Amino acid sequence: MQFDLLHFHEGIKKDRIMFCYSGPISQSTIEGIGKTLRMNMEIEEAGFNVSQAVFSIFVEQMQNVLNYSAENLNWNKELDKELRAGILVISQEEENFAVYCGNLIYNSDVQQLEEKIEAIRALNKEELKQLYKKKRKEASEIESKGAGLGLIEMARKAGTPIEYKFTLVNDNYTFFSIKVTVRRKKDG
Amino acid sequence: MIIILSSALKLQLGGKKMDKLLIEKTESSPYVCFDAGKNFLIIQGESFPENAAKFYTPVLDWLHAYLQTIKQEEVVVEFEIIYFNSSTSKIFMNFFQMLDEAVATGKNITLNWRCNEENETAIECGEEFKEDIEYLPFNIVLFKGV
């Protein structure tokens, strides 16, 4: 056996990773993992509202993969059932829960996404709320399956600003990773 | 033949009869029951479908048609949502704006945003919707337990 599963398992434990998933993501993956995540948060005694915040960030991140990952595995466009690749890690860091998510994006989309995240990172809680409400009332972008609100939603639920990283993979793709942290004890 | 009969029946009722809209809940989409006969509309459960715009198209279409049929009768709309994602949030705003406009033109509609008293997120979300509407009576109703 070439792949050392025990070593992998121990590494995950050591890093206090509660969840990791890598591979094809569909809506049913989100529903299934989401259900388990909620149960697990209960075991962790995270409290209903912290648990809701982690769940919400998880859903927004996974649905971003589902809508935007450049690694599209769906061969049948007629089905309207997306299947796209991404990676998700939920860990405990000190007194926080951290939700990490990564996927490939097209190099041509990097700049726009970076500007979007930077703009959000610059805002305080009240400004985020106002931006969220403003965007919510605007008409949707054509061809957009989401509402373009996901990043703002995550930033509002997070205890610290969104962290992110772009790593150039090749001429076409960049790996995009995002980390959103939720405080175990909710502050006002 | 059946189709002809049912449309004839609708004509007899002055074209005002609307079918009930019933959608069963799934892991990621809510139970929807819009009963034009009782003037009672309810959406209940979770909402993070794969494509929120697509899921809610028949819901918004039904509402749009229904608002044309009502006059002064009392209409109660209930939302009891545990969790909804950001794309659903946009649809709900759109839904409330439609109700708001109807109330502005004299319709008698009340919205009850029902949530568990422990679900702070749902309560806050209700308050934020309430801030963004003008005419629609928007009640945040708290309940205990499930």
Image (cartoon, coloured by chain):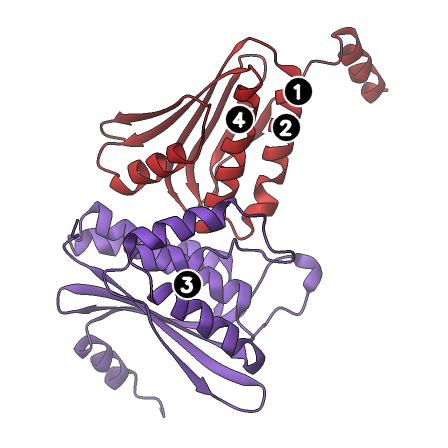
Chain colours: A purple, B red
Relative to A15, say whether B107 is above or below. Answer: above
Q: Residue at x 58, y 91 (%)?
A: A171
Residue placed under numbered mark 1 in the picture: B68
Q: What residue type is labelled 1?
A: Gln
Residue B99's disc number: 4
Q: What residue type is labelled 4?
A: Leu
Per the model, the C-alpha gap separating discs 2 and 3 is 32 Å
**Element marked by disc 2:** helix
Q: Which residue is drawn at 53% across and 15% down?
A: B39
Q: Contact, CB < 8 Å: mark 3 with mark 4?
A: no
Q: Are marks 4 and 1 on the same chain?
A: yes
Residue B77 percent coordinates (x, y):
47, 23
**Element marked by disc 4:** helix
Q: Contact, CB < 8 Å: mark 2 with mark 3?
A: no
Q: Which of marks 4 and 1 is nearer the N terminus?
A: 1
Q: Nearer the viewer, mark 3 or mark 4?
A: 4
Q: Residue at x 58, y 72 (%)?
A: A72
Q: Quadrant of residue B57?
A: top right
Per the model, the C-alpha gap separating discs 1 and 3 is 39 Å
Residue B46 percent coordinates (x, y):
41, 41
Relative to B104, say whether A156 is above or below. Answer: below
Residue placed under numbered mark 3 in the picture: A61
Task: Choose between A115 and A8: the one closer to the eye.
Answer: A115
Q: Which of marks 4 and 2 is nearer the N terminus?
A: 2
Q: Is residue B4 left or right of residue A182?
A: right
Residue placed under numbered mark 2 in the picture: B64
Q: What residue type is labelled 2?
A: His
Per the model, the C-alpha gap separating discs 1 and 2 is 7 Å
Q: Contact, CB < 8 Å: mark 1 with mark 2?
A: yes
Q: Residue at x 23, y 32 (%)?
A: B117
Task: Choose between B44 and B95: the one closer to the eye.
Answer: B95
